[in-house]
Image (cartoon, rainbow, N blue to C red):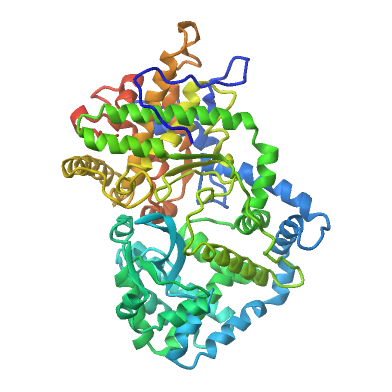
Amino acid sequence: MRKLIISLAAITLMTTACTKQQTTGIHLENLDTTVVAQNDFYQFACGGWMANNPLTPEYSRFGSFDKLGLQNLEQVNGLIQELASKKHKQGTVAQKIGDMYNLAMDTARRDQEGIAPVQKTLDEIAQINSREELSQVLGAAMDFQLWAMYVDADAMNSSMNIMNEYQAGFSLGEKEYYIDNDEHTRSIRDAYVAYVEKLFGLFGFDNAAERAQTVLRMETRLAKAAYSNVELRDPQANYNKMSIDELQKLVPQLNWRVYFQALGVELDSLSIGQIPHLKEAGKMLADEPLEDLKTLFAWQVIEGASSYLTTEIYMTTFDFYGKVLSGREEPSPLWKRAVGIVNGTLGEAVGQMYVKKYFPEENKARMLALVHNLQKALGIRIENLAWMSRETKDKALEKLNAMTIKIGYPDKWRDYSALDINTADSYYANLQRASKFEQEYSLSFLGKPVDKAKWYMTPQTVNAYYNPSSNEICFPAGILQYPFFDMSADDAFNYGAIGVVIGHEMTHGFDDQGCQFDKDGNMLNWWTAEDKAAFDARTKVMEEAFNRIEVAPGVHANGAFTLGENIADHGGLQVSYLAFTLNEEAKPAAERLQERDGFTPAQRFFLAYANVWAGNIRPEEILQRTKSDPHSLGRWRVNGALPQIGAWYEAWNVTPESPMYIAPEDRVSIW
């Protein structure tokens, strides 16, 4: 990794192998020029795209991300189908990819097999006769749990891996679905109970209605004890390292040494994520009727299997999660679901094929130049912060200098030789083996040094991430395409699109969560008390600004829940715009970008940013995402973010008469 040297000198020019004149990258058909840009910038920049890409029955939301994701799915599907159409030697990666795809596509076989593939697990649950068995049973179980265990870096010693515990056991995911009492949430709960009852009936259980009420009661008990999404964003509160003996005292209802022995690991300590939830789960193991516990375990098994058995069972699950929760009218085509399964089980093997065909090396070189320019720009902004002391600035710059950059694909690929995919067994059985393979892969890192080369997304993924425990930013090959990145487009476009994405991920290292981790990824304070108080005051302005946004009639955005992503959007815009302007200033006057397609370079920067978030969304999905998604909705990543950016006012001549105008003294100013 290159070390950053902070300087006020001009940023290195972003080079490209292209010799012909570059395009603006702006597709004019995406615009809605009937709208005044200063009144509703999202509609102006994205209205044409929205009209040209209406929601189909398959989608609850369809945006630029989804459109690129669909393109990637089609590309990957072509690669997989080529393998699936031929016979391959058993045990080869080609055989595993092809056979897993064919198993996923074979609905006739699943309809014939019925619930038989899952019956053995259900029988084993039915045969639990005493609470004393639960320590062994839960440790060995893959399909049912009241909590989750996973291996990751120790937040206080980021060079070593540790076992981590996390709240689980309630299928609706968000605790608000169990405790809120507005009309919409009550209707969701009623539909959920009906869904649980129907699925129990399809699996041949008696007293299905009574079992559904049992599931709701027990999941509600777990959900009430769980942390909210806002509480989950506090790294300090979700790290509780303790010895096995201390865990035994905390939750005495289980024999934890037996549990971990059944899990197949040896450990002396671990971090408990959400203590109130785990304590409540322990109490449930002791005071809930054993038959009710078995009902909950059976529910987790059958719901977990429901997407991989008969068509009727699959559609029952879709009817609730797809239609009721998200407003979708039809499920995704079978081939898309099959590609998703192959990506999920053999992701890096597929990724290796993907980058070979679809990711030219020159794309990686141009991205590296962009990233280094963004690093330098963020360094300059840190240097110029009036609210931060020299002491804290030096620590922030150290962290920025130490940031690892991953672009395109891993330097080393995963080994899938231990994964057995065999068409002699059911689709569900193969997926179970794949899950076991993943579990053993994760557990293999326990107690070992963190593998800094490990990737947490596949190369074909349309996304990016910042990992605080390793202080790294990662941009898979999948996202390095239009509308995020375009080798044929000029700098105004690429800085406005992928440049802001890069700045977004960098800023995550300095958002309300990332700022609690040092340059090495340890959860250690590097702030003076005065600087942290100033930072918190500035982020509070951001939180309150988004709290005021009404996303649906009577429903407001959750500024605390979305704070980290909103800070990252804000930082990404500020940092990338500075990098862009310095990049332009470094060019000879004759080469600087001029007005093209009717827009100045600065205007095209903001149009490119807005087009990244173009999309249509159903009312049900708005409500669901407001509860569950830490990102603001696409419209508000534009209309909520840009009015906080001074350069946007200058580029578009936004005056106090504009409904989007915010007085300078009231705008967010952080990084």
Give left or right: position of 23 versus 150: right
Q: Quadrant of residue 228?
A: bottom left
Q: Nearer the viewer, residue 328 or 297?
A: 297
- x, y percent for residue 614: 47, 37
In this view, which residue lies farthest toward the bottom? 129
Please name the residue shown 47% across and 73% down the image: 266
Give left or right: position of 378 versus 366: left
Please name the residue shown 39% across and 89% down the image: 289
Give left or right: position of 131 versus 530: right
Q: Quadrant of residue 277?
A: bottom left
Query: In which quadrant will I find the C terminus?
Result: top left
Instruction: Check the image and report above or below for 506 versus 602.
Output: below
Q: Nearer the viewer, residue 350 or 54?
A: 350
Q: Nearer the viewer, residue 49 or 145?
A: 145
- x, y percent for residue 669: 25, 33
Give left or right: position of 198 versus 100: left
Instruction: Check the image and report above or below for 126 versus 421.
Output: below
Instruction: Check the image and report above or below for 79 versus 276.
Output: above
In this view, which residue lies farthest toward the left? 530
Please name the residue shown 45% across and 43% down the image: 472
- x, y percent for residue 494: 50, 27
Q: How many marks?
A: 0
In this view, which residue lies farthest toward the top? 590
- x, y percent for residue 241: 33, 66
Q: Is residue 32 visible?
A: no
Q: Is residue 352 visible?
A: yes
